Image (cartoon, rainbow, N blue to C red):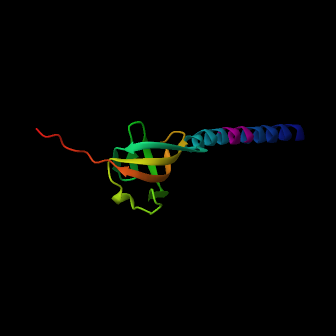
Amino acid sequence: MFENAKGGIIRIILFVLMIHLVVMSIEALWAKGDVVTGTKERILTVIKAKDRGFINTDKYRFLLMESTKISDIEGNTIPFYKVPVPVEAIIVFERVQGSDPHVLEIVIQKEIISRSQPE
């Protein structure tokens, strides 16, 4: 009588452990989507466009974070709405798997003034 009960309990424990492993595996795969590489990269580029929470260059679309620091070449802080476009800037960022690169810092180098061609 006890042997049958022990076998049933062992089956239930094994079933619960298997379900737990499956759930943990799914959770781990889901969490991988937002993995930050942890390595900072720095590029000198031209910011071609900006939008709420994003900036675009020739090669990348960058996601701005709440903690993104924006300054000019002398170190003065600049609010995002005052960043001229187009502008040459140094962008410090981290790549994030499954997302646009996250901008940590923007240092404005020089504004690019486009001159209209006479007709």
Judge from the rendering whether residue 97 lies leftward or rightward of residue 115; answer left or right: right
Q: What's the residue at 28%, 48% (across, down)?
A: 113
Q: How many marks?
A: 0
Q: Main secondary structure of the magenta part?
A: helix
Where residue 104 sits: x, y (%)? Answer: 51, 52
Quadrant (top left/top right/bottom left/bottom right) for the N terminus: top right
- Residue 88 lies within the magenta run: no
Q: Residue furthest right?
A: 2
Judge from the rendering whether residue 58 lies leftward or rightward of residue 13; answer left or right: left
- Name the one closer to the observer, 57 or 22: 57
Where residue 67 sits: x, y (%)? Answer: 50, 58
Residue 85 visible in the snapshot? yes
- Name the one closer to the observer, 85 or 29: 85
Residue 1 visible in the snapshot? no
Where residue 3 sits: x, y (%)? Answer: 88, 37
Quadrant housing residue 2: top right
Q: Residue furthest left?
A: 119
Range covered by the magenta-colored residues? 17-22
Judge from the rendering whether residue 9 lies leftward or rightward of residue 114; answer left or right: right
Where residue 119 sits: x, y (%)? Answer: 10, 38
Judge from the rendering whether residue 1 lies leftward or rightward of residue 91; answer left or right: right
Q: What's the residue at 35%, 49% (across, down)?
A: 50
Quadrant housing residue 21: top right
- Name the one closer to the observer, 11 or 5: 11
Q: What's the residue at 45%, 56% (across, down)?
A: 73
- Residue 19 lies within the magenta run: yes
